[in-house]
Amino acid sequence: MFLAACGSLPMPFERTPNSGPPSSLLRPPPARIVVPPSTSAGLAQAQARAFAGELAKALQEIEIPATAAGIRNPQYSLLVAGEAEAGQMRLTYSLAGADGRPIASAGGPRAVPAGAWAAASQGTLAATAKEAAPAIARMLATVDAAQRESSTGALAERLPSTTVAPITGAPGDGARALDRSIRAALEREGVVVVEGAATGEFRVTGQVVMAPLPRNQQRVEITWIIARADGLELGRVAQLNEVPRGSLDGLWGDVAPIVADQAAAGVVEVINRHRNGG
């Protein structure tokens, strides 16, 4: 449960039937995407070309027109970047417009072991591309819808946009994992997450507080604060759970996407109430 207004009500971390549609049901709007070989994902040139091909193939399999071949004036380009951390390679996929500027990004669903990524076998590249395709599809759908809706000029008919402030208080890789997951979850809910120096209509801030409990447990409380761009707070979404002590001191793994999926629904309720005058 969540409370999308002033104050907060805890909700546990658990996956629900409303966590999102299966990838087989995704039908993003048509788009022309070119996938160039990445120069910043830690792959040699031949391996980068192979991965670009696998990404294009994976997107085609979910009915997104994509190609790894060079085409003139593509509507979108899919850029891939990688960051090595603790023996893992974390990949980020960015969608760039016709001018080459990134307009949206999404993290890979999970990190790839650095050794397997460096070896870059066909199986590893294909599996990584297939796992990433649904997140790329959702990102594309959000961008395409935002571009269509922005032409109406009416606030109520535009997709909401938000910045996501750095997440504080999370141990281990929690700040990075939650940041990546909440951005992806908000985009699935139809919120445009703006990057860099751009200003969104709203601002979402995540705060994590850990507290010791008896029997070697820890209380984890995550609060998401939703504010207007001018700083006026609109509401909060609070989540809490008990976990074994120290279990989140390293990688958050599947916990971050579960937390983000739940939190995004509450964030969107706050946003919708404000937009509808509630």
Image (cartoon, grey):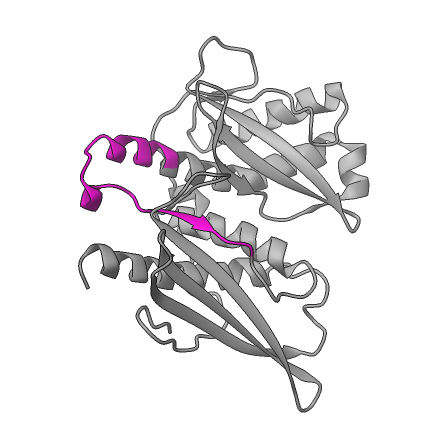
Q: Of 223 and 20, which appears nearest the observer?
A: 223
Q: Residue furthest top?
A: 72
**Residue at 74% from the left image edge and 31% from the top image edge:** 42
Q: Is residue 3 left or right of residue 82?
A: left
Q: Residue at x 55, y 22 (%)?
A: 35
Q: Is residue 134 above or below residue 75?
A: below
How many numbered discs sit on the rendered protein?
Answer: 0
- Quarter of the image with the N terminus is bottom left
- The image shows residue 223 at horizontal and vertical percentages of 47, 69
Q: Is residue 175 left or right of residue 193?
A: right
Q: Quadrant for the C terminus, please.
A: bottom left
Q: Tell me what residue is drawn at x 47 percent, y 51 percent.
A: 164
Tell me the residue at 55%/11% (across/down): 70
Residue placed furthest toward the front:
230
Q: Is residue 108 visible?
A: yes
Magenta-highlighted residues: 143-166
